[in-house]
Image (cartoon, rainbow, N blue to C red):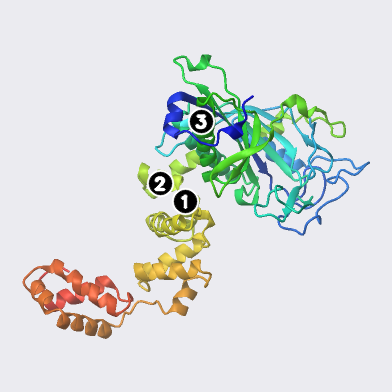
Amino acid sequence: MTSLSQFAEVLDYDEALEKFDPVLGLEVHVELNTHTKMFCGCSTEFGAEPNTQVCPVCLGLPGALPVLNQTGLESAIRIGLALNCSIAQWCRFARKNYFYPDMPKNFQTSQYDEPIAFEGYLDVELEDGETFRVEIERAHMEEDTGKSLHIGGSTGRIQGAEYSLVDYNRAGIPLIEIVTKPIRGAGDRAPEVAKAYVSALRELLRALKVSDVKMEQGSMRCDVNASLRPRAEDQDAVPLGTRTETKNVNSLRSVERAVKYEISRQAAVLVEGGSIFQETRHWHEDTGITTSGRPKSDADDYRYFPEPDLVPIAPAAQWVEELRATLPEPPALRRRRLQSEWGFSDKEMRDLYNGGAVELVEATVAAGASSAAARKWWTGELARLANQQEKTLAEMPVTPAQIAQLQALVDGGQLTDSLARQALEGVLAGEGDPEQVVEKRGLVVVSDEGALGEAVDRAIAANPGIADKIRAGKVQAAGALIGAVMKEMKGKADAARVRELVIERLAPDAEA
């Protein structure tokens, strides 16, 4: 087999899609927000001191027996139902045998051929409003592993590290793994489809309140499987290519980039006559490339067998229907309802969704702002700042309540739009709530008519030519005087009132 290392170059993406048809498979691991682990009573709180949330069960000590977390089971069933899956009338756990230093038992308690949920689908909305159906093969329960910390070196990976430490706090935390069927037919939109699917899945899980789905903390992780096959008239007759699995991609943007890179990389290998090696690969956020990890095992290599220490699960049909009744309004239907309530166009709502701002706008409206003002803030100034800082809107250090407070100050006449943006800078800098920032920075609008009138008179005296144009009926020239007044008053004047004062002095018969 030809070594992949011989082919470091990537093929132009458009050229790759002319020659090959991409097929994807996405495996998303979701940490449930239960208070205790999947098979023991240890806490699942994030950020505790290493190895302080462990016990004989999650450490795999001899004689320790697991007990299934009922809330974890309920969450698994609700996730399956929300994904339009069938719920198993009878299923059981299995032991998945492989060795990792951060897996204390040398096997993972998981599910294999008897998952709790199977045969479902999720319809996802693409950026142009088109809907793409992603079919779900299964959603199954399992436990998370611990975490290896590689000390020394520059990358945080084992290569080049001086030594490694293991934190078992995460070992045993409840996981749901959601596995898609092969995603065919996406073509050149495969990266977009992958991103849209993970985004829609995260939105659904957040609505179910089963996980905080914080990808940056690892509570939602995506493994991206990608393969290429030659293009043909009867594409269904072409067998699938050899896949690679890019592990633990932890942001929506990275999912999209990883798919695009793997398509271009694999295409370069195939065009040069090489073969794709079935393996796991590491995604490098800084360079935007993947590198080889380890050979990818097939299911037989894991030596699955039924877990002898846990009884089978047989959820009663009535209980499943009771759980179905707890499902929230589907996110897509909710968006359509909100769009109608807010009076937004299809494009405005699509921009909110693509920017990850729907929930932020909803919370801002709930805090007292108008829908139009909320949309303006989150898709305008905040979107611009987030883009500059390469952050998502949700990562910006400001709350919907603070944006509503900021807008209330504008609506009440205490701030101009310009001053409000300055106040927002203070909030983002950690200086407090909007009112505190306004007080500290002295940003309140000057409302003293005498001070405004004097500033207008000075601007007129300093610009006699412009004043004559306004007197002659060219009211649009007032903008220059307004700008002069705003500059003198450092943006703290009400521009509308300044315009009125200019017109009153120079063209009293004109409409302000």
Q: Nearer the viewer, residue 93 or 144?
A: 144
Disc 3 crowd, CA 10 A, few/some/many (<14, 14-19, 20+): many
- Which amino acid is tagged 2? Asp
On the image, numbered disc 1 is attached to which residue? 357
Instruction: Check whether the beta carbons of the residues at disc 2 and disc 1 lie within 8 A of each other.
Output: yes
Picture quadrant where residue 2 is located: top right
Compared across the picture, whether 291 is left or right of 107 comes to left
The image position of residue 435, as x and y in percent, is: 47, 73
Distance from Cα at disc 2 to Cα at disc 1: 8 Å
* SS under mark 1: loop
On the image, numbered disc 3 is attached to which residue? 268
Residue 234 drawn above or below residue 76: above
Of callouts 2 and 1, the N-terminal one = 2
Residue at 49% across, 68% down: 427
Quadrant of the rendering where the C terminus is positioned: bottom left
Compared across the picture, whether 261 is left or right of 291 comes to left
The image position of residue 319, as x and y in percent, is: 71, 34
Q: Nearer the viewer, residue 150 or 270?
A: 270
Of callouts 3 and 1, the N-terminal one = 3
On the image, numbered disc 2 is attached to which residue? 351
Residue at 49% across, 17% down: 235
Of callouts 3 and 2, the N-terminal one = 3
Number of marks in picture? 3
Residue at 54% across, 23% down: 273
Residue 271 visible in rendering: yes
